């Protein structure tokens, strides 16, 4: 978990330094540890979708996250 957290911070710093306004990502409903990691780094869930017809039938969702970078603070 320490490595994942450090990589996430680095991606956010990289994007912020290059003037991006936000970072977006997606993860599946079964990746609970990843969801916690992203939420702990400032990402918020902005939606969900089904990856395919089979995903819909199985109620297997993909969660979409966004972290607004703001003015670098």
Image (tube, grey):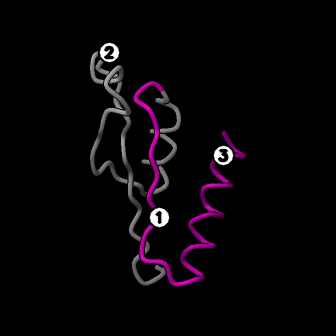
Judging by the rendered image, the residue that carries numbered circle 1 is: 23
Q: Nearer the viewer, mark 1 or mark 2?
A: 2
Range of the magenta residues?
A: 1-30
Q: CA distance from mark 1 to mark 2?
A: 29 Å
Say which of 54 and 12 sits in front.
54
Task: Check the image and report above or below for 70 versus 6.
Answer: below
Disc 1, SS? strand
In the rendered structure, which disc, 3 or 2, sits on the residue that comes first in sequence?
Answer: 3
Residue 15 covered by magenta stretch: yes
Disc 3, SS? helix
Q: Nearer the viewer, mark 3 or mark 1?
A: 1
Disc 2, SS? loop
Residue displayed at 49% across by 29% down: 31
Task: Check the image and report above or below for 8 versus 60.
Answer: below
Judging by the rendered image, the residue that carries numbered circle 3 is: 4
Crowd around label 3: few <14 · some 14–19 · many ≥20 (10 Å): few
Q: Which mark is residue 58?
A: 2
> What is the quadrant of residue 59 in the picture?
top left
Crowd around label 1: few <14 · some 14–19 · many ≥20 (10 Å): some
Task: Check the image and report above or below for 53 versus 6.
Answer: above
Residue placed farthest to the right in the image? 3
Q: CA distance from mark 3 to mark 1?
A: 16 Å
Left or right of residue 71, residue 17 in this image:
right
């Amino acid at each position: 978990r320490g490595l994942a957290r450090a990589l996430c911070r680095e991606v956010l710093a990289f994007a912020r330094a290059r003037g991006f306004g936000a970072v977006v990502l997606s993860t599946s409903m079964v990746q609970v540890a990843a969801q916690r990691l992203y939420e702990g780094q400032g990402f918020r869930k902005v939606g969900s979708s089904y990856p395919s017809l089979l995903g819909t039938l199985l109620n297997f969702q993909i969660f979409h996250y966004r972290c607004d970078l703001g003015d670098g603070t």
